[in-house]
Image: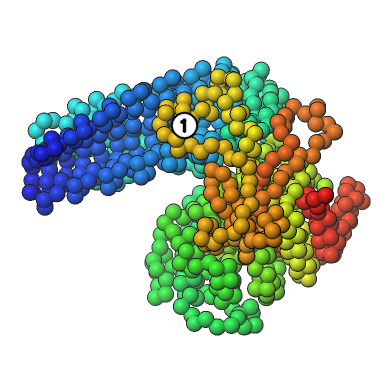
Amino acid sequence: MTGEGRLIWPSGASYEGDFSGGYLHGFGIFNGSDGSIYRGVWRMNTQHGIGRKQYQNSDVYDGCWKEGVREGSGRYAWSNGNMYIGNWKDGKMCGRGVMKWFDGDLFDGFWLNGLRHGSGCYRFADGSYYFGVWTKGLKDGLGMFYPAGSKHRFLRKTSDRHDQKRKKQLSHTSSTISESVKPKVNRSISERFSYSLLKGSGSISLRTTSQGEDVALDDSSRDMLACDSSSVLSQSSDDKSDFLETGSVAYEREYTQGVLIKERIINISRLSRKSKQRIKFHAKEVKRRSCVYFLEGRKSYYLMLNLQLGIRYSVGKITPVPIREVRQSDFGDQARIKMYFPRKGSQFTPSHHSIDFYWKDYCPMVFRYLRELFKLDAAEYMMSICGDDGLRELSSPGKSGSLFYLSRDDRFVIKTLKKSELKVLLKMLPDYYRHVKEHDNTLITKVFGLHRISLKRGKKVRFVVMGNMFCTELRIHRRYDLKGSSHGRFTKKDRIDEATTLKDLDLKYEFHMDKLLREALFKQLSLDCRFLESQNIIDYSLLLGLHFRAPENLISLLQPPDSQNNVETNPEHEGGIFQGELSIPPRGLILVTHEPSSVSTTPGPHIRGSTLRAMSVGDKEVDLLVPGTGRLRVQLGVNMPAQANQKLMQDEAASVQVELFEVYDVVLYLGIIDILQEYNMKKKLEHTYKSLQFDPMSVSVIEPKLYSKRFINFLEKVFPVEP
């Protein structure tokens, strides 16, 4: 069968449209025996392309299909009045999208497997808003709640824009598709159908006309999709001082698996202009200090592209070399790979769309063996960093002015280095290699590569590739950078958001762990600090990530009497579309005997060596059961369960911030970072002066041995011994 025709099956189903080589291929109308109707594009007997399907229960989907399932951009209208416009994958809502319920509630944000997952904005029917983060359909993390009637110009503009655009999208999609399809089917109808749908729906862009391509949303939605997953929350936090008028009140809330654990009332009228100016000034200072400040606009893109080209070349060149023992010469000045990458290509390098640059790879054989010690596959390493998705640039969390790049799968962090830091790392590399080889549980940052890019006019940018210890199965709710000092170690409240890395004085918890887990932790901390002492290293810190769990006795709080919260947190109310996929909040954390077949043993960039033993299960290797998530392997610095007890301050009663609970179940992730600051006499004098003027504790930073001693003593207070 080739051409146009009509086919009727004994079951009562029928098809009228295009055929090719015996297949339903092209544009056609299919009437199913169950009463469903599909009008759209086919490829080899499956729905593939743009189409409209009306289901037996009167639900209607308009949008993209792939291999017979909804995938791409589209609009789904339920028979009960609910409606979703956005991205789909494997037949489920996935990516950026807008869901509107029949009662007037609306969610605009990110989805995963049919559940809200990521940052977004929830608008209630009464006009109140919540900007925050969701995990598997439940609010999880920091967010801002604006009551109905808030004098917020940004909210009013957002509301008006949503109302206008969504009304236009929802009103035109169905009528346009139905009018474009004629009873008589021919090949030109397929073209008219695609063009008409693209032109009239408002939710699908004109750039997609061929079968199998993804379809994009309207202009505003495309802009949303281009944003990072944290953009919605950060925008709401950054803009509150610009848009909220005098007298407005908002609520900064923090949730854990749908349970409200903290709330702070914010009177926006008290925010001064100085706070806004300080933030802007801080951004300028970071940019001025950055070692690559000359890279602006497209040049930043060129820098990332050059980095990908260089890593692909270096790893591809060193991988085929036969395995041998690491030699002393592999650490020397001659252990370098140098190559010139002209745009037009050369005998050894491919052509590219970036600018000409020189590439240098330091100690490639050593880092090859380090990657093997960390059980990192070379192909996965290249695909993660050098894949088509590219890298994401992050803002600097510290004062160094370094730039940070994150691989698209979040497995690797790439940081720019100063020349002095590069020299320190090369100097300590032989001992670092031996330390990692002897101690597979080391908490010191994993280093996978060291590179340099030289641009025109002699400008050089140095990079180090490290593992991202926060690439985890569980969401990280808090991040702390702990040095054991009190001098300047706090974060101003107006600068705290979901991604802020807090400091020593911001830590209000102490953590109680299983006895054997704690012993293993401090044994390795002592070994790592002793190694850093031998390298004359100071000023390093412990990066601590916390994942909070809502205890079983808090489940009832998911359905508070307040009607606003009840609408948002009750999954059955929100359209009735999840069909039991939403997991019940956790029952707590449980340690069980380790079973290799039940957990993933695939090494990652943050995984630390062997499985740990716990006293609570009879001195056996353990796994962690996390209800609603799965079974995780407990390793040093990874998936370590603990109980976080809040330390009540004397001025707690005077604080406007309310901590609703004093004890939490948490999962810990930790590692030692910032290991490239070498001790010298100049720093000794500077820190001595600071210690005399400000902080008596800071005197211990003048020597590496005293620094490590203070560092361990501080952590022993953070992780006290069980009585």
Q: How many marks?
A: 1
Crowding near the residue tagged with mark 1, few <14, some 14–19, many ≥20 C-alpha atoms within 10 Å:
many
The residue shown at (27%, 44%) is 68
In terms of depth relative to the viewer, which is nearer, 223 or 358?
223
In terms of depth relative to the viewer, which is nearer, 694 or 471?
471
Left or right: 138 in relation to 695: left
| Tag 1 secondary structure | strand
| For residue 136, above or below residue 528 | above
The residue shown at (39%, 75%) is 347
Residue receiving disc 1: 108
Decide if residue 334 is in sight here. Answer: no
Disc 1 marks a residue whose amino acid type is: Asp
Decide if residue 139 is in sight here. Answer: yes
Residue 334 lies in what quarter of the image?
Answer: bottom right
In terms of depth relative to the viewer, which is nearer, 540 or 65?
65
- The picture places residue 511, in percent across and down from the top left corner, at 74, 47
Q: Residue furthest right?
A: 692
The type of colouring in the image is rainbow
- The picture places residue 53, in percent across and down from the top left corner, at 25, 34
The residue shown at (75%, 67%) is 527
| For residue 279, above or below residue 447 | above
Left or right: 356 in relation to 709: left
| For residue 325, above or below residue 391 | below
Q: Residue furthest front?
A: 618
Residue 522 lies in what quarter of the image?
Answer: bottom right
- The picture places residue 614, in percent across and down from the top left corner, at 69, 57
